[in-house]
Image (spheres, grey):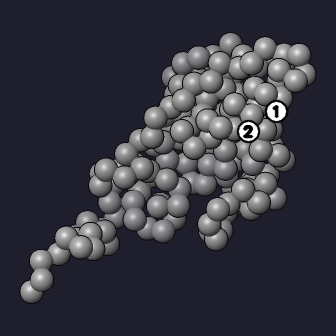
Amino acid sequence: MDVALGGTFDPVHDGHRAIFERAFELGEPTVGLTSDDLATRMRDEDRPVRPYEERRHDLEAELASFAAEFDSAYEIREIEDPTGFAPEPQFEAIVVSPETETGGRRINEIRVDRGLEPLDIHVVDHVLAADGEIISSTRIVEGEIDEHGNLTPERQGRVPSGDAADG
């Protein structure tokens, strides 16, 4: 089965790995990696994103290990717009996170408008960090957690505001 998925993947973390694993379980994934321009335009926060080639290098390493495990092929394609290549006719499924499920539905609208079958949308649940919050690239970049959701040493002893006893 030809499977589509996409993202900025900066940095790659266990939430992304769960999406990659599901994509390889389904078939041969084509992974859209946002161009530098698209990665900048899609950001809701003011956080720098590493250059495309650096992100691609790291993504390639991650996908190669899944490809070996699943004995499967994959492809990485640069995407310049949010729907990427998923409206192309060869794809049968798309793997998304809860945040990108709406985008998957939008892709299906485009496909139907083009006379194509909608994709099977596979939503992969969030992976939670040690503190019970969602693992995200932003939290990693801000130094709260590592790529596996472990609290960084700076955060391990921190008491959430409002929970500290008045002294």
Where the C terminus falls, by quadrant? bottom left
The residue at the point 29 percent across, 55 percent down is 131
- Which is nearer the N-term, disc 2 or disc 1? 2
Residue 167 shows in this picture: yes
- Residue plotted at (59% across, 17% down): 26
Q: Would you say 113 lies left or right of 150 here?
A: right
Q: Is residue 138 left or right of residue 107?
A: left
On the image, the x and y values in percent for residue 165 come to: 12, 77
Q: Quadrant of residue 107?
A: top right
Residue 155 at x, y percent in the picture: 31, 68
Residue located beneath label 2 in the image? 32
Position of residue 115 relative to residue 52, above or below, is above
Q: Is residue 34 left or right of residue 160?
A: right
Residue at (53% x, 56% y) in the render = 137
Q: Are marks 2 and 1 in contact (CB under 8 Å)?
A: yes
Q: Quadrant of residue 161?
A: bottom left
Q: Amino acid at mark 1?
A: Phe
Percent of width and height locating residue 68:
56, 24
For the residue pair 112 and 160, the one nearer the viewer reads as 112
Q: CA distance from mark 2 to mark 1?
A: 8 Å
Quarter of the picture containing the N terminus is top right
